[in-house]
Image (cartoon, rainbow, N blue to C red):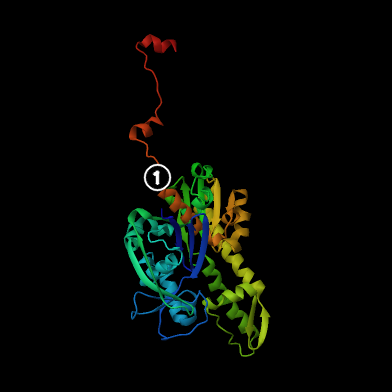
Amino acid sequence: MVTPVYIGNDQGYYGTKVVCRHGDKFYKLFIRNMVVPNRVGEITYNNDPHNIMYRESEGDREWFVGKLAIEQSGDDELFDSHERRLFSPTWFREKEYLIMFRVSTGLMLQGCKEPIVSVALPTDSYIDYKEELKRRLIGKHSFEVKQGNLPYRRIEFEIKRENLYVISQPMATLFHIALDRDGQLLNEDLFIQKVSINDLGFGTSDVETLHGETIIKRQSFSSRHAMLSVYQLLSKRLLEFTREIDPDKTGKEYQIWSLNRVIHSGEISFKGKVYNVSEIVQSCIQEVGQAMVDEVWHRLDYADDITYIILTGGASIPFKPYYRERFGDKLIFAEDYGIEAQFANAFGLCKFSQSKSKSVPVKSEQEVAATIQEEFTVPEKKEETEKK
C-alpha cells in the first residue's frame, strides 16, 4: 500500500511555505517567492540546495527560483514582480506562480506521484477565483529541477481533482489550531463561536471572520497595512535621517528590498560610518501597527460579538503588542500552537488535506432534518387548550 503524502502549500507575497506529512513525520519548507528567467547562462554554485533552477525539459528555458532568483535579478525586476503579486488577485495565472508551485510541491513529494494537496487564496479573491485556480493546478506536472551543483533531476506528479482543496488563507490557520496532527477535530469551540482570523503578511493583511466554516463577509477584508508598509515608511524616514547628517544634504535612498537587514540589525552604514537607527525602525513598526489595529477595531465593530481574535502570519510577531493592547484576552496567537506563525497557514492546509481525504459517512436528508425537529402534540378539542 502506498503511503499518502499530504501537502499544504501557502504561496504568499514574500515567500512560499509548505508543510508535508509523509507517514508519521512532518516536514516544512520555505522558499523566497521569486522566479526570474536565466539571463546569465551556465553558472557554477557551491552545493547549496537553496540554489534552485527549473526547466521543463533539456534545452528549454531555465528559470532561477527563490534565493537564486533574488540574487540574480535587478531592483526593477524585483519591484515589478512583487508589485504584480501585491495588486493582482489573479497572480496564479502567471508562469511564475506555476513554477513556484511545482518546485515547492515537488521537493516535498518523498517519491509520491499523487499527493493530496491544499492551497489557499487571499480573503478577497477566494470566492471569485477558487475554481479557476483548481483548473490551473489539476493535471500532470512534469519538469526538471537542479539544486546547487547537482545535475538536473526529473520530477513528475499528478494533482487529481479529488485530491485538491482550495480554501481561504486565514481559514487555514483556524484548521491549524482546531485540528490535531491527524486532521481530527481538537477544539470544537472554535467552530461554535464567532472567530476573526487576522493573517498579517508582508504585502497584505487578510482579516476573515467566521462562524464555523461560514465567512461573515461584512467583517472580512484585506488591508493594505502590512510589513511592506513598515518598509515604505522606513525608506522615507532613512532618507530624511541621512539628509540631516549629510554635509551635502543629499542623503541616501534605501531601496525597499534592501531594508530587511536594517530592520533586524537596527543599523545603517552611511558614508563610511555606522549609525544606530533602531528607534526609527521601532517608530515605523509602531505607526503601522497602530493604524492596522485601528482599522481592524472599526471594521469588526469593536469585536463586541467576536469571541476570539486569532493572530497569524509572518508579520504577526512585531504587531502582536498592539493587538494585545486593544483586544486583550480575546487574542489567540497562532505561534503558541507548536509552529512558527509564518507556517501556521501551511500547517493548517496540511491538516485540512488529511481531514478531507478521510472518508466521513454522510447523513441522509432524513437524518439531518431529524436533528432539528421538535415533536409536539395538537389538542383535539378547544377545551383541552383552555385547560392548559
- Judge the density around disc 1: few (<14), some (14-19), many (≥20) Cα neighbours within 10 Å: few
290 or 150, nearer to the observer = 150
Most foreground residue, 369 or 385:
369
Q: How many marks?
A: 1
Q: Position of residue 380 (x, y in %)?
A: 34, 12
Specify whether 352 is left or right of 244. Answer: left
Q: Which residue lies at the image location 62% right of the left edge and 55% below the top edge?
A: 324
What residue is at 47 percent from the left and 67 percent from the top? 13
Q: Which one is nearer the viewer's eye here, 12 or 197? A: 12
Residue 155: tell me if it is visible.
Answer: yes
Viewer-proximal residue among 287 and 275: 275
Q: Position of residue 303 (x, y in %)?
A: 54, 49
- Single out the residue that lies furthest toward the bottom: 248
- The secondary element bearing badge 1 is classed as loop
Q: Quadrant of residue 119?
A: bottom left
Residue tagged 1? 359
- Quadrant where the image shows the C terminus: top left
Q: Relative to 357, say whether 264 is above or below.
A: below
Query: Is any atom of residue 225 visible in this view?
Result: no
Horizontal relation, residue 24 to residue 145: left or right = right
From the viewer's perspective, is 291 left or right of 112? right
How far from the left and from the top, in percent, is residue 238?
Answer: 60, 78
* Residue 167, x across and y down, in percent: 41, 55
In the image, what residue type sits under mark 1?
Answer: Ser
